[in-house]
Image: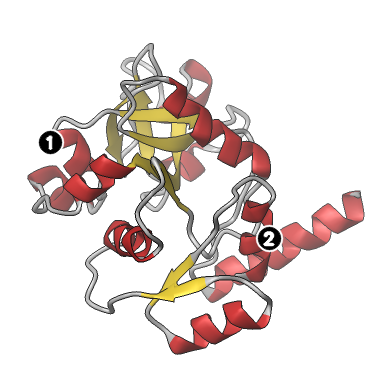
């Protein structure tokens, strides 16, 4: 948590940890960070983000929702998502990563790595746990070399008024089918613009993720 906070503070002036756990609140305060206690009843991180925004005064135009389990987040990723709002039509912004054609198809197929299809204006048209687009007439193992795939990096930013509105939306059919919250926003007509990052990150959700993150950090330190 501290590493995420310090990484983000390199770019953003106002950084707040939103939590419903006293232990997290105390840990953040111990390293000099700012945290707010939010409701334990929220359905999603988006709802929690909105409450934290209101508790902080509700004066910012754009709010970025950054996961606390992303210790390798980089300043260039934050700048990429911020740049999406140079387009006045952007309601919500997120990040995508081009899938490296040298990587095996099984990594692309992993349902825990959502895929996204973009239009020519870098707006998201659909997110899926399935591999999209389907490449007709090509063996699946060759798909990564046949077209450019994009995987989703789960960071979001919202215009403040959009954040308030989407927290009032009921769950949608596509969201329920894929268990991807962002599909609710697309189904309701909101524009999601994607920034591109090639930076590798590891979200830590499981003990295996923690082991991979430690190995990643060790490799970075060895390289440097």
Left or right: 162 with respect to 62?
left
The residue at the point 14 percent across, 35 percent down is 187
Q: Position of residue 217 (x, y in %)?
A: 76, 60
Q: Looking at the image, is mark 2 or mark 1 nearer the viewer?
A: 2
**What kind of element bears circle 2?**
helix
The local crowd at label 1, few if under 14, some if 14 to 19, many if 20 or more residues have their Cα within 10 Å, is: few
CA gap between label 2 and label 1 equals: 35 Å
Out of 195 and 16, give the one closest to the viewer: 16
> Which residue of the protein is positioned furthest toward the top in this rendering?
120
Q: Is 6 rendered above or below residue 39?
A: above
The residue under label 1 is 188
Q: Position of residue 95 (x, y in %)?
A: 47, 37
- Occupied quadrant, residue 37: bottom left
Out of 149 and 171, give the one closest to the viewer: 171
Left or right: 88 with respect to 224?
left
Q: How many marks?
A: 2
Left or right: 112 with respect to 106?
left
Out of 20 and 136, give the one closest to the viewer: 20
Residue 149 appearing in the image: no
Mark 2 / mark 1, whichever is N-terminal = 2
**What kind of element bears circle 1?**
loop
- Occupied quadrant, residue 122: top left
Q: Name the colouring of the figure.
A: secondary structure
The residue at the point 48 percent across, 54 percent down is 66
The residue at the point 91 percent across, 49 percent down is 224
Q: Which mark is residue 6?
A: 2
The residue at the point 22 percent across, 66 percent down is 43
Out of 209 and 2, give the one closest to the viewer: 2
Q: Is 180 rendered above or below residue 97?
A: below
Residue 30 appearing in the image: yes
Q: Position of residue 91 (x, y in %)?
A: 30, 32
Q: Position of residue 42 (x, y in %)?
A: 24, 70
């Amino acid at each position: 948590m501290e590493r995420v906070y310090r990484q983000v503070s390199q770019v953003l002036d106002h950084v707040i940890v939103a939590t419903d756990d006293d232990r997290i609140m105390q840990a953040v305060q111990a390293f000099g960070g700012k945290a707010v206690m939010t409701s334990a009843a929220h359905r999603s991180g988006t709802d929690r983000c909105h409450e934290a925004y209101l508790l902080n005064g509700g004066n910012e135009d754009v709010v970025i929702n950054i996961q606390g389990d992303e210790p390798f987040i980089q300043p260039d990723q934050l700048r990429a998502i911020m740049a999406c709002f140079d387009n006045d039509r952007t309601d919500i912004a997120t990040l995508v990563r081009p899938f490296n054609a040298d990587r095996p198809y099984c990594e692309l197929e992993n349902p825990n790595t959502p895929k996204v299809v973009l239009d020519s204006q870098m707006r998201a048209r659909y997110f899926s746990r399935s591999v999209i687009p389907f490449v007709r007439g090509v063996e699946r193992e060759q798909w990564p070399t046949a077209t450019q795939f994009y995987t989703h990096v789960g960071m979001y930013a919202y215009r403040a008024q959009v954040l308030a509105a989407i927290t009032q939306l009921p769950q949608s059919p596509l969201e329920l089918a894929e268990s991807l919250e962002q599909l609710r926003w697309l189904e309701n007509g909101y524009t999601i613009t994607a920034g591109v990052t090639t930076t590798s990150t590891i979200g830590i959700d499981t003990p295996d993720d923690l082991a991979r993150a430690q190995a990643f950090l060790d490799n970075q330190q060895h390289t440097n």
